[in-house]
Image: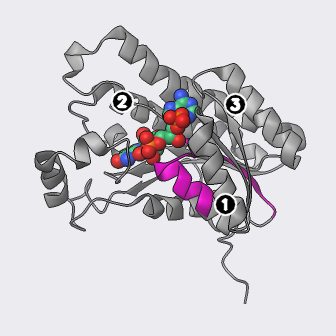
Amino acid sequence: MSQPAIHLEGKVAIVTGASRGIGEAIARAFAGAGAKVVLAARKPEALSQVAESIVAAGGEAFWHAAHTGHPEECDALVRAAIERYGKVDVLVNNAATNVYFGPMLDTEWAAWDKIFEVNLKGYFAMNRAVARHLIERNAKGSLVQMASVAGIRAAPLQGVYGMTKAAVLSMTRTLAVELGSAGIRVNAIAPGLIDTRFSAALTTNDAIRDHVVSATPLGRVGMPEEIAGAALYLASDASSFVTGETLVVDGGWTIG
Ligand SMILES: NC(=O)c1ccc[n+]([C@@H]2O[C@H](COP(=O)([O-])OP(=O)(O)OC[C@H]3O[C@@H](n4cnc5c(N)ncnc54)[C@H](OP(=O)(O)O)[C@@H]3O)[C@@H](O)[C@H]2O)c1
C-alpha cells in the first residue's frame, strides 16, 4: 500500500515573511519535511537567524532579503532561489501587512497604498514570477496564498486589510483556473486569530481576545505551527487534486 505523500523531498520552496510568526513555522515545517527552503523578508537579522537554525537542525535553507511590495525584488528573489537550488516548485505567499487599525472611513491613502502594495501587488508579483518559471520548465508546482478569515467575513477596524485578503481569494481562484492545465495548483489558507507579533494588537487586548475566544468552538487562539500543517498539505502531493480552494484554519470561528 502506498504511503500518503505529505512530504516535500526533492522540492524547492520559497516562503515569504519567513523571519517570524507563521512564515517561520512554515519554513521550519517544510525543511523538516525534506524541502530546500528559501526564506525571504525585508530585515536580514532575524531572517538569517531562522535560516541558520534550520541548517543547524540538519535542514537545507538559505535566506534572501526582499521587500515583496516591490515587483523587481520579487523577481530577484525568484532568480536567487533558482541560482542557488536550480528550480522552484513551491511558493508560500505569506508576507503581508496591516498598518492601520480603525474605522474604515478614516483610512489614510498612504495606509491604503501600503496595504495594497504588499498584500496584493506583492502576492501577484511572486505568483507571476514563480508561475512563469514553472511554465518555462514545464513543471508542476503549488502556489499557496496566506489569506485570512478577514477576507471571508466582515473585518471591522481592519477593513482595507480585509479587502486585500478577499482579493487574494479571488486571485487564488482565477490563477487556479488559468494555470490548472499547466499542472500548477493555487490554493489559499485563511487563518483565524493566531498568536504572532502581527496579531499582538488583538491578542494582548483582553476584551478583543476574550471576544474572539468565546466565539471560537475550540476556545483558544491558534499557534503558528497549526498553520504550518495546512501549508505543508497544500504544498505537497498529498493535495494533488486540490486547486482554487481556501482552507480555513480558525478553530471553528467562522462557523461558530
Ligand atoms: N497572526 C494572525 O492572527 C493572522 C491571521 C490571519 C492571517 N494572517 C496572515 O498570516 C501572514 C503572516 O502573519 P504573521 O502573523 O506571521 O505576521 P508577523 O509575525 O508579523 O510576520 C510577518 C513576516 O512578514 C515579513 N514582512 C512584512 N512585510 C514585508 C514585506 N513588505 N516584504 C517582505 N517581507 C515582509 C516580516 O519580516 P520583515 O519585517 O523583516 O519584513 C515577517 O517575517 C500574513 O499574510 C497575515 O496577513 C495572520
Say which quarter of the image contains residue 233: bottom right
- Identity of the residue furthest to the left in this view: 207
**Whole-percent x, y for residue 145 in the image:** 54, 43
Disc 2 residue lies near ligand 1 with CB under 8 A: yes
Task: For the C terminus, give its image quadrant.
Answer: bottom left
Residue 128 numbered mark, or none: 3
Compared to 100, does 224 lie above or below?
Answer: below
Q: Amino acid at mark 1?
A: Ile
35 sits to left or right of 99: right
Residue 119 in sight in this render: yes
Residue shown at the point (39%, 11%) measured from the top left: 110
Task: Please provide the residue range marked out in magenta.
Answer: 10-28
Gap in angstroms between the C-alphas marked 3 and 2: 22 Å
- 83 displayed left or right of 20: right
Mark 1 vs mark 3: in front: 1
Q: Is residue 19 part of the magenta span, yes or no?
A: yes
For mark 3, does the 10 Å Cα neighbourhood hold few (<14), some (14 to 19), or many (20 or more) residues?
Answer: some
Q: In this rendering, is residue 245 above or below 169?
A: below
- Which of the two discs, 2 and 1, sits closer to the camera? 1
Instruction: Give the Cα distance between marks 1 and 3.
Output: 28 Å
Establish if 52 lies above or below 164. below
In terms of sequence position, does the residue under pointer 1 or pointer 3 come before the other?
A: 1
**Whole-percent x, y for residue 141 in the image:** 73, 50
Q: Residue at x 66, y 78 (%)?
A: 4
Horizontally, is 236 left or right of 93 in the view? Answer: right
**Does dot 1 land on a helix, a strand or a loop?**
helix
Q: Which residue is disc 2 drawn over?
A: 161
